[in-house]
Amino acid sequence: MDLPETGGATTRIWLHASGLVPAEPVINGCVVTYLTVLTLLEPALGPMGKSSTDVSALLDHTVWFRRPADFSDWLFFEQNSPSGIGRRALATGTLLNRSGALMGTASQEGYFPALRNS
């Protein structure tokens, strides 16, 4: 049985490193990529009636960097899910610094398997 199509959910979070992140752009980019993988599908989960433990596979994950991220300050991450249909969900996100400058955008697609009967 396929799940109904859903979409339009949005989550907004502030990101900040709990420890020291070196000022090197490559390291900050890796931290941004890691954090976006962890949270980007969240707006799709509720409307689809799923939790993060229901995700079977991340089909793709892309981050486009517009400016180097700087974790000496906070980053604002607005995420939305324009589509959750069948067993797949798509989510996109926008990363802004505290002054509102675009730092990057991200997208991710996840797969939710059918429940198995025991």
Image (cartoon, helix red, strand yellow):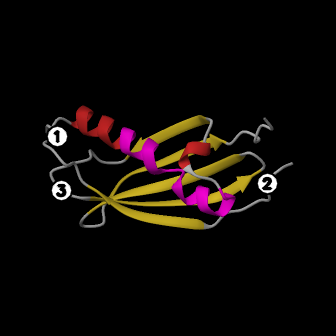
Question: Given this view, does label 2 or label 1 mark the residue nearer the observer?
Answer: 2
Which residue shows up at 77% across the image and 59% down it? Answer: 5
Drawn side of residue 74 relative to residue 61, left or right:
left
Drawn side of residue 38 relative to residue 76, left or right:
right
Q: Position of residue 77 (x, y in %)?
A: 39, 59
Q: Quadrant of residue 97?
A: bottom left
Q: Earlier in the sequence, mark 3 or mark 2?
A: 2
- Give the position of the C terminus as an image quadrant: top right
Camera-nearest residue between 47 and 91: 47
Q: Residues within 10 Å of mark 2 (few under 14, many from 20)?
A: some
Q: Is residue 50 magenta?
A: no
Q: CA distance from mark 2 to mark 1?
A: 41 Å
Drawn side of residue 77 relative to residue 27, left or right:
right
Which residue shows up at 75% across the image and 42% down it? Answer: 115
- Mark 1: amino acid: Val
Q: Secondary structure at mark 1?
A: loop
Residue assigned mark 3: 73
Which residue shows up at 52% across the image and 38% down it? Answer: 61
